[in-house]
Amino acid sequence: MTHPVDQRLPLPQTVALGLQHVLAMYAGAVAVPLIVGGAMKLPPDDLAYLINADLLVSGVATLIQCVGVWRFGVRLPIMQGCTFAAVTPMVLIGTTGGGLPAIYGAVIVSGLLVVALAPFFSRLLRFFPPLVTGTVITIIGITLLPVAATWAAGGAGSPSYGEPRNIALAAAVLALVIALYRFAPPALARIAVLLGIVIGTLAAIPFGFTDFSHVGRADVIGVSTPFHFGLPTFEVAAIVSMIIVMLVSMTETTGDFIAVAEITESDLPPGRLADGLRADGLSTALGGVFNTFPYTAFAQNVGLVGLTGVKSRWVVAVSGGILVLLGLFPMLGAVVAAVPPAVLGGAGIAMFGTVAATGIRTLSRVRFSGNSNLLIVALSIGIALVPLGAEGIYDKFPHWFQIIMHSGISAGCVAVILLNLLFNHTDRKVVAQS
């Protein structure tokens, strides 16, 4: 029998489900180029170019990850997008004299290094038991929920942030998703998030939440060419900081792969994990060539796989194709960009909550009596929530420390791995003597 991951659904259903994945990750996908480009004070045309390049390479990276090319691609329903862990170092590199060429040089080198390290990193899979993976998946869901809350309030920096009408729109979309998921026929329940986003966007237009007037001003066709901003430069400090980012990203990506394998009931042996990590490295190197940034698995879409129950990698492969079209045809991207943040917030609460619930389900298989597992989970989640509750707490620490600890996901990942090693992979007698 065909495994659910390899099932091919009818084309109309596949396209609808693929579009649902794109809408779920679009805001996060374009956020990194907007933040980096804005910090470097790039003109609007260059910002638009960065976004188109990002969407194009995101689509190619997703296709590589889902479909697989030789030893590249985990062949699971995984969406790829720019990693937020790289934002801080890229802003520092770009604004301290190196510019975009220095960023892209560091991105290319770090991506190639990930390709080389993937087989060795995958052998560490034995250090990712359900205790670690369940904690990581729970942390991913919990740390993404504030993102959904920010969207529900109107989006960071919005003049209408926190207005009751934004919260009301988000609540209405969430209620619609719940109603469709509970009462609609199975075919419609699978695309409950997509229907919630589409209906919520259409309903929001008369109330002034958004408009599509800017769509007509967007270019019809836009192709990203290699080294558009100049040939890359290779600066040691920039390369070292980006390598640290990619090591953290490999840990996060491993957690995402394990989460999707858990949801889809798929095996994830070291060889398959290495193939997925190689695809991350290849996509990152391509990002440096085609004027964009490092790539990783998008946790947003992990929750959508769990929420809809659609496990086919070909659905997400179609999502990659849609992203390629959005990157090649900016006018299509402008249509998707018109979705109000509050609408995404209502859908995001359901998706990210599902990620956290998946982690809790994994932790339910862990034995907590007569050991230190409860302490490991408690400390790891606590450390992950510190940068969320006290933003900027690590601003005065060394640069490499900020890269790891500013992200709740990476901080929690590192904490649970180290604590599991300390309590479950170290001889207690040696610890006591030391």
Image (spheres, rainbow, N blue to C red):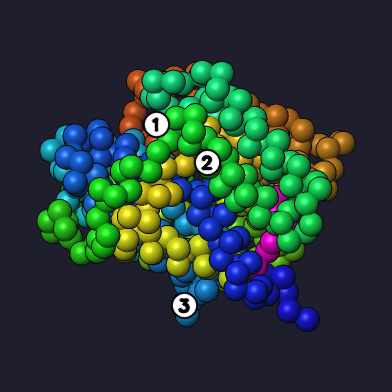
Quarter of the image where one finds residue 112: bottom left
Sequence-wise, the earlier of marks 3 and 2 is 3
Looking at this rendering, what residue extends furthest in the front direction?
206
| Quadrant in the picture for the C terminus | top right
Q: Above or below — where is 387 with respect to 428?
A: above
| Quadrant in the picture for the N terminus | bottom right
Q: Is residue 337 left or right of residue 140?
A: left
Q: Could you give the CA–CA distance between mark 1 and mark 3, rounded to whole angstroms?
A: 35 Å
Residue 300, position as x, y percentages in the image: 56, 46
* Residue underneath mark 1: 402
Residue 13, position as x, y percentages in the image: 63, 67
Which of the two marks, 2 or 1, is nearer to us in this view?
2
Q: Residue 69 got which mark?
A: 3
The amino acid type of the residue labelled 3 equals: Val
Q: Residue 201 got which mark?
A: 2
Q: Above or below — where is 68 with respect to 395?
A: below
